[in-house]
């Protein structure tokens, strides 16, 4: 391997990675399979690709081309050198609106092409649900389709010309009439015309095998089309000319409700004569909530287009009239359509979990049958599942007869893997019996190639092998795919994971307490690799800032998987590769909500840091900021806040303090409040007033010591709403809720004074023993509160999220933790639930800012939206993460990424705000980031409302 790496470094101008991290990141795609490569190369151009092929041919090392790594059949993994086209060869070379074509490089993400084509009224027809991260090269390699294939066909239908390098270094320009055909291909086809005319099923989604029938003379001898779907086994794509279609000016979405999926499937083919843009189907099993959907147990999503909204709606209503439905809904509002489509697109991740939370896996992800036979096929498919005691929920492209499904295979035990094989063989026979294709979109890969003789017969498969030999006589390109395949039950990615549960600190309640199962959640759909977020989405800010796979949620999950496997990452919890990948994780928790399978990288990071530094000296920032509540309490008790602020204002002293504390030199140290929130509360009287519901206001560390104005404002608003406000007890003993005193002199003498804390700073730095101790002390203090029905109102979203999730998951053995978590309300939730008749003061101004990432991920912001609307605060807050994220943005080495995260959404939104707009930022980190990077003052919603109370 050393000679190969050295030769590649001499020959290639792009990056060459033979290190553990580079290899670990590409061991898997979105399939069940895992193969460990020797190295990864990110070529800069076609010359680099040619150089890689020459070096690998000399060393007899296979080459695998890889795009977004979202393939579901295993074809984006390999044991040789992986070519990563996403880093450099990812450009849109040009668009010709008159010719309706675009020239693209293989690493270009589909959404970037769509964004560039949209101003011309054009778009690329195929649109898989992974459109925000899949690449054009991968789509051509798999002949991908998507939801609009009933209108615009497969990727092969949109390909015009392809620039390809063969394994032996020939540069070919593939097109029609044998253009670019390698020597020997035409002779091969001329000798097999009868077989090519009769041996291929005639259906819209036949993706399996090689498309050799595209080379028939009556089909234009289209070499480019025949190359589509070859899964990187014939040549390496370096550039493509693709066709664009006219995008309808207006669209409408008819959602048709049916009793069950079979009813929806049988209706789909009958809607095709109406010329819809989509006919997508899914059943109730995959929908977390049916709110907003028409009545039914299954639905068809039928999109129509037109020059005007009225025309699109009329066509959608015609679809409804022609369909025999239980219920129907027609939506023309673009926002409403996006919301509904998000339900369908997220099914690719949602389907990886059964309704009871058990795991489900790909492998039979996209079989296709003639659309008219789909209903019968689905019934037979259900019977086959039952016979094998398996479960799965079909969904997908009903109009094209293409079904996606994840099945609850047991791929961890020998018996389960044997059942996986038997089921696969029987299902292949069932698909063929219905005149179908084993793959209708995602390719054969390792999952299905072994079964191609059941579909095509041995002689046609032998023809595939001959075609492969014409293109790649040395079998250098992606060997083991399509021809001479590896067994479908070999190289399973789960086989390397430990069989015994890993000893961990968090409870992982959704994964049965098993850390391996938590890591297995990441199935590689790569929603975390998107380069932009929609709405209030968050995931994954560090990837958007760096563009590096290791800084995506998926990349980190892959490294954790390899850490557990112990083959590549051999030093377990002490791994520096995993530590470095997690270093730029902001712990924003965005993946907990935005990832379709709810990977929770913030928790995994805290777990890893706990074990990684066990018995070892930690980074200085862990002591400076992890123990921040302690340092701030000391400053408050000794009344030294003015002195600390004065010293921090002296730049040389501040620089020394930051260097010693592991704090970024570019950061300004926040000023400590002269009077803490609790001290202000005690001066005010320290007791609830009024006669409304009692609410306990949580004095989090940030509100208490750094921005007590937020706490004071919240008290004013809550009391104005008629609520009685109390603070948590500060004495462990029989304290009275709200005043911190005890019932007797004896109890007062024996009680221990303390202050509640959610433990967030300790959790985020992985000091879980300390976090657990702080949380238990907090539960002791909160015992009197838990004996009442009073809610706990938390103003800082990150602290509220920690109490809702980290507390019960870390103290999973203490029932008090779950009880306290259930009491936690945000400021807006408290007003909505406990003062429903209160009308907030009218602000009547536009609002900008950002929904706090932890609020988005854990708490939800529906109540906040309603409160803002009621107060006359107009406009939508942006998504993403502010980039400061607690301790992250203050740590040395994080400043650039922190600032880049802020520039992604927050700072542009504030700069573009209309005059007089209110900048909302409920989190202390968000307010600090705004102040330090934009000179803007962000305010908590409580402060905005309190100001208007006067």
Image: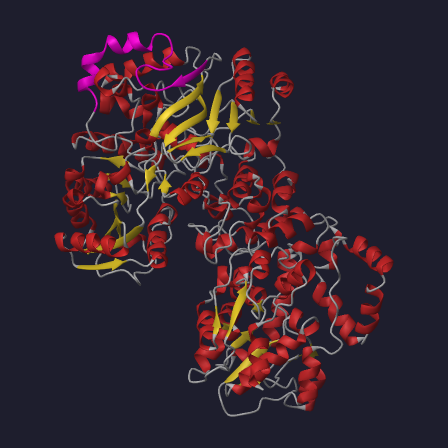
* Residue segment shown in magenta: 171-200
Where's residue 537, x and y in %?
48, 55
Of the 4 image quadrants, the one containing the C terminus is bottom right
Q: Nearer the viewer, residue 780 or 198?
A: 198
Indicate left or right for 913 with 666 as reference: left
In the picture, measured across the screen, residue 659 lies left or right of residue 235, that is right
Between 878 and 680, which is closer to the camera in this rendering? 878
Q: Is 429 on the left-hand or right-hand side of 693?
A: left
Write down the quadrant of residue 767 in the picture: bottom right
Question: Picture quarter containing residue 95?
Answer: top left
**Whether residue 387 is visible:** no
Q: Nearer the viewer, residue 309 or 136?
A: 309
Establish if 173 lies above or below 424.
above
Asked whether 179 falls inside the magenta stretch, the response is yes
Q: Is residue 489 left or right of residue 876?
A: left
Q: Residue 136 location, x and y as percent?
A: 42, 33
Q: Is residue 366 above or below residue 544?
A: above
Residue that appears at 38% across and 15% down = 180
Q: Residue at x 24, y 39 (%)?
A: 150
Does residue 577 appear in the picture of this structure?
yes
Q: Position of residue 279 (x, y in %)?
A: 24, 46
From the top left corner, tell me how far across and down residue 275 is, in percent. 20, 43
């Amino acid at each position: 391997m050393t000679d190969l790496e050295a030769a590649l470094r001499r020959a290639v101008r792009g990056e060459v990675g033979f290190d553990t991290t580079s290899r670990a990141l590409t061991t898997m795609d979105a399939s069940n399979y895992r193969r460990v490569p020797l190295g990864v190369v990110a070529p800069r151009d076609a010359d680099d690709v040619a150089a890689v092929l020459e070096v690998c041919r000399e060393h007899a090392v296979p080459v695998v081309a890889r795009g977004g790594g979202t393939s579901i059949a295993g074809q984006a993994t390999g044991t040789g050198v992986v070519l990563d086209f996403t880093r450099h060869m990812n450009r849109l070379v040009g668009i010709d609106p008159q010719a309706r074509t675009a020239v693209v490089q293989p690493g270009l993400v589909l959404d970037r092409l769509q964004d560039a084509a949209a101003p011309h009224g054009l778009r690329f027809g195929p649109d898989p649900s992974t459109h925000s991260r899949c690449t054009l090269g991968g789509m051509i390699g798999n002949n991908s389709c998507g939801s609009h294939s009933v209108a615009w066909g497969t990727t092969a239908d949109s390909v015009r010309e392809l620039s390809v390098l063969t394994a032996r270094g020939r540069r070919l320009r593939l097109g029609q009439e044998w253009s670019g055909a390698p020597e020997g291909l035409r002779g091969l086809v001329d000798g097999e015309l009868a077989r090519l005319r009769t041996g291929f099923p005639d259906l819209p989604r036949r993706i399996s095998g090689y498309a050799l029938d595209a080379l028939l003379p009556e089909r234009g001898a289209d070499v480019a089309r025949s190359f589509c779907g070859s899964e990187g086994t014939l040549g390496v794509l370096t550039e493509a000319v693709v066709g664009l279609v006219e995008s309808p000016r207006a669209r409408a979405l008819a959602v048709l409700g049916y009793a069950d999926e079979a009813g929806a499937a049988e209706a789909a083919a009958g809607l095709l004569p109406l010329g819809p843009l989509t006919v997508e189907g899914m059943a109730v099993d995959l929908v977390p909530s049916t709110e907003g959907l028409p009545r039914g147990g299954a639905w068809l999503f039928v999109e129509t287009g037109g020059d005007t909204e009225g025309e699109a709606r009329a066509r959608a209503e015609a679809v409804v009239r022609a369909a025999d439905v239980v219920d129907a809904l027609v939506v023309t509002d673009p926002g409403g359509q996006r919301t509904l489509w998000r339900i369908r697109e997220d099914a690719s991740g949602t389907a990886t979990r059964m309704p009871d939370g058990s795991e489900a896996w790909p492998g039979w992800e996209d079989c296709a049958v003639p659309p008219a036979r789909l209903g019968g096929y689905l019934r037979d498919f259900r019977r086959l599942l039952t016979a094998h005691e398996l479960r799965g929920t079909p969904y997908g492209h009903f109009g094209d007869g293409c079904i996606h499904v994840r099945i609850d295979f047991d791929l961890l035990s020998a018996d389960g893997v044997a059942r996986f094989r038997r089921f696969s063989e029987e299902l292949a026979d069932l698909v063929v019996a219905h005149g179908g294709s084993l793959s209708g979109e995602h390719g054969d890969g390792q999952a299905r190639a072994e079964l191609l003789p059941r579909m095509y017969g041995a002689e046609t498969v032998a023809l595939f092998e001959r075609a492969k030999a014409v293109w790649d006589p040395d079998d250098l390109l992606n060997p083991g795919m399509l021809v001479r395949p590896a067994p479908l039950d070999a190289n399973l990615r789960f086989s390397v994971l430990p069989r015994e549960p890993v000893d961990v600190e968090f409870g992982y309640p959704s994964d049965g307490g098993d850390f391996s199962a938590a890591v297995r959640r990441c199935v590689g759909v790569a929603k975390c690799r998107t380069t932009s977020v929609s709405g209030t989405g968050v995931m994954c800010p560090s990837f958007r800032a760096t563009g590096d796979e290791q800084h995506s949620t998926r990349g980190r999950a892959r490294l954790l998987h390899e850490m557990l496997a112990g083959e590549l990452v051999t030093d377990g919890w002490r791994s520096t590769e995993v530590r470095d990948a997690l270093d730029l994780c902001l712990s924003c928790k965005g993946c907990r909500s935005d990832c379709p399978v709810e990977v929770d990288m913030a928790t995994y990071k805290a777990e890893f840091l706990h074990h990684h530094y066990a018995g070892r000296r930690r980074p200085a920032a862990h002591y400076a900021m992890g123990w921040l509540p302690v340092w701030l309490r000391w400053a408050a008790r000794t009344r030294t806040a003015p002195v600390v602020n004065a010293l921090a204002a002296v730049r040389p002293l501040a620089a020394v303090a930051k260097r010693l504390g592991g704090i970024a030199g570019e950061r300004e140290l926040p000023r400590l409040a002269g009077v803490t929130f609790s001290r202000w509360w005690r001066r005010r009287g320290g007791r609830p007033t009024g006669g409304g519901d009692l609410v306990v206001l949580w004095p989090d560390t940030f509100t208490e010591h750094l921005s007590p104005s937020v706490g004071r404002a919240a008290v004013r608003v809550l009391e104005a709403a008629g609520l009685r406000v109390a603070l948590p007890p500060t004495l462990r003993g029989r304290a009275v809720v709200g005043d911190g005193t005890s019932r007797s002199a004896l109890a007062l003498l024996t009680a221990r004074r303390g202050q509640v804390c959610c433990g967030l700073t300790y959790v985020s730095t992985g000091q879980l023993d300390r976090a657990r101790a702080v949380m238990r002390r907090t539960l002791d203090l909160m015992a009197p509160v838990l004996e009442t029905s009073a809610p706990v109102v938390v103003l800082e979203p990150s602290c509220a999220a920690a109490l809702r999730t980290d507390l019960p998951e870390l103290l999973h053995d203490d029932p008090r933790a779950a009880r306290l978590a259930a009491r936690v309300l945000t400021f807006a939730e408290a007003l909505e639930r406990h003062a429903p008749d209160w009308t907030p003061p009218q602000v009547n101004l536009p609002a900008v800012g950002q929904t706090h990432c932890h609020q988005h991920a854990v708490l939800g912001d529906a109540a906040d939206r309603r409160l803002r609307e009621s107060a006359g605060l107009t406009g939508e807050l942006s998504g993403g993460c502010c980039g400061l994220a607690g301790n992250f943005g203050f740590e040395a080495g994080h400043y650039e990424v922190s600032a880049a995260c802020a520039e992604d959404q927050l700072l542009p939104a504030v700069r573009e705000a209309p005059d007089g707009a209110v900048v909302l930022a409920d989190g202390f980190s968000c307010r600090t980031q705004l102040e330090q990077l934009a000179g803007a003052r962000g305010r908590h919603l409580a402060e905005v409302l309190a100001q208007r109370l006067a």
